[in-house]
Image (cartoon, coloured by chain):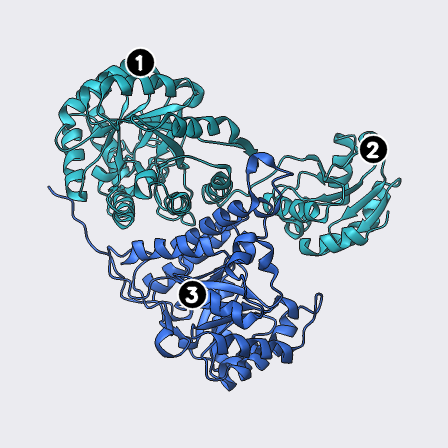
Chain colours: A cyan, B blue
Amino acid sequence: MALKGLDIFKITPKTNCKECGNPTCMAFAMKVAQGAIPLEKCPHISAEVMAELSEATAPPMKTIKIGAGDKEFTLGGETVLARHEKTFVSKPLYAVSVCTGQSDEKREKVLSALDTIDYDRIGERMYVELIEVNDGTGDKDQFIELTKKALTYNRTLVLSTTNAETAKEALALCKDEKPVLNGATPDNYQEMNAVATEAGVVLGVCADTLDALYDTVAALEGLGNKNLILTVSDKSMKDAFAFAVQIRRAALKNNDRTFGYPSLVHVNRLAAGDHNMQTALASLFTAKYGSIVVMEEMTYSQALPLYGLRQNIFTDPQKPMKVEPGIYPLNGADENSICMTTVDFALTYFVVSGEIERSGVPVNLLISDAGGYSVLTAWAAGKLSASSIGKFFDEFEIEKKIKNRTLVLPGKVAVLKGEVEERLPNWNVVVGTNEAVELVKFLKEFKG
Amino acid sequence: MPFKSTPQPFNAAINAVTVGVGDKAMTLGGENVLPLYTFDAPISNPPKIGFEITDTGLELAVPGIAALYEGAATIGERAKKAETLEGVDFISLKFAGADPNGENKSAEDCAAVAKEVAGATSLPIVVEGCGNAEKDAVLFEKVADALADKNVLFLSAKEENYKAVGAAVGLAYGQKVGAESSVDINLAKQLNVLLSQLGVKNENIAINPGSAAVGYGFEYVASTMERIKAAALSQNDTSLQMPIVTPIASEAFGVKEAIVSEEDMPEWGPAEQRGIDMEISTAVSAIAYGSNAVILRHPESVKTVSSFVKAMTE
């Protein structure tokens, strides 16, 4: 249970020594309670009290790291059930699945798509982060061969097998890359725990019921392993969702730390062979409480909505999404094409650029730094003004780079026209439309 | 110590709003749990799936949709074909052609189309306007009159036209009013309050608090819906307990990902499948955050989203 400020105050020396950087012990206690600073900042609290309290002040859901180097990812660490309450901290990761016993052709299709789907969306790299290697046949040699093959794709692996011997040999190949070993069950958790702990990797736990899963996690924690991921049921979609929600809710709402771990969802098993249903389920578990979402494959048509959804949900609601300021040539625009300007708020950029693309008219879209606000908000906050536009033109040397001298302003800031004309005397400043949807008509009819 | 799985239903519930008449009438809402949380309490009225038919036939540009309508010459025949699709709970008739900036079809013409569709199908009907507040008010009144005994839901009354729409559709003809606001819980609440002050009963109101395709500001839609459900269920806020209806079709099929041709973006693959995935992903996400009904355009999306809902709630 989270501690209140007063509970923490009781264990401070109450001397207001300021060594922690706070004016009083009470101020320090309040900040610790909010999670703003760690308890360790106070040099006067004894080690025993500290150990006792760090358990109580620890976050309800553990932060688990998988992978190594530039393939290291953070899972879990969430403190809220809904994004409007605070912020989600760890976005879910997508995995594609390969399996021993499946046809070479199928496997090739899944793996070869990995290189194709790798693109940038508002400054975030969109690609399949993980590969799950499944023990379909129970044959150790086949599993080792498949692991070797998967390793050549430069992704962090999830090794799914319930055979401790197989797991051990596979980990010998790649334990430094910190894959997940997924396959501890109520029957084999002791052997699997030994293998995972020795290799220093995260252990995935599976069970048929929430009760059995809970008991197995408790038993593993009893053995000292708190580096876990919980696999939700793959019996039915309904069960899988019930697992995912109840695990997360138990940890965050009911303070039951035994379930305070990230979850793994086998969408590939819940809807085997059904592309569209996998899109549906991957969306559901991106929205609610999947930490690793395993799919049979990832096609571009699935990636586009899924990565868009994930980027939307896992942005900080207190921080607007921004695109980089710069010149965005659309529809094959060159130095002779007209210029339009708008703000760097990602949603504005997407809607405006989408409509310009629909018009088919070549346009240089100029995005200046407006603090990530929408047009009117940026204008009201003084972040979109004649001087901000002028500054952008100077910094990006627009007059050198573009020969055309027509600049279209967003209709909502028509009032800026005079000032912009003054600041950019060589330019023909035009007021555009109020709404982006009117742009297609506007551009098609626009003459010089 | 075993895991204590405690069901967490709420003491308040979403209003149950019935649309349509006869055997195929459907009820939206009624649940006292968060979306799809059947482990807390049963959900007796699972989210409903609507199939969108436009008066202009703009959706026929997509081959998979045109295939469904093969041999259907009139909009009535199209409605008949749509009814045969498995998983469709209602027909959503959209008057895209009524837009004054487009074809500007008269309200009378639209009412005739509505009558034709209603005569062809026994499914509940939802009427979507053209989005122009002034025109929709006139249009809805005529259609409400033409479909007087069909218990139709109209999308939507907005801040600009709620008086006209609420009075005509809700009060004069006793039809169901859809209240549309733009992704803000306070605006949604305000419009509901205004409609009740006008005399429209709560059980005759459904809401559309905004929609967007995933990737296009969907986080605002998600958070608005989540907050509405939280206020409705945990704080028993009666002015936010209306079921949510979300039109997905035009959002999903209107974004770049669904429109750009395969020639322009060869690695993206066929445009039609991109539209389907976009529609499925947006619809399922909307349901996960609180939609009690979604309106879709592609038969494949209907198939997947309806079996998804079935699997999650039965």
Q: Secondary structure at mark 3?
A: helix
Q: Nearer the viewer, mark 3 or mark 2?
A: 3
> To which quarter of the image does residue A49 belong?
top left
Q: Residues within 10 Å of mark 1 (few under 14, many from 20)?
A: few
Q: Amino acid at mark 1?
A: Leu
Q: Chain of mark 3?
A: B
Q: Are marks 3 and 1 in contact (CB under 8 Å)?
A: no
Tell me where residue A93 appears, x and y as whole percent. Answer: 40, 34
Q: Which mark is residue A399?
A: 2
Q: Which mark is residue A173?
A: 1
Closer to us: B170 or B56 = B56
Q: Chain of mark 2?
A: A
In the rendered view, tell whether residue A410 sits above or below residue A370. below
Q: Is residue B3 left or right of residue B304?
A: left
- Name the residue located 35 percent from the left edge and 55 percent from the top edge: B307
- Whichever of labels 1 and 2 marks the residue nearer the N terminus, that label is 1
Q: Which mark is residue B84?
A: 3
- Real-space Cα separation, disc 3 to disc 1, in angstroms: 55 Å
Q: Secondary structure at mark 1?
A: helix
Q: Is residue B75 left or right of residue A165?
A: right
In the rendered view, tell whether residue B312 sits above or below residue A316. below
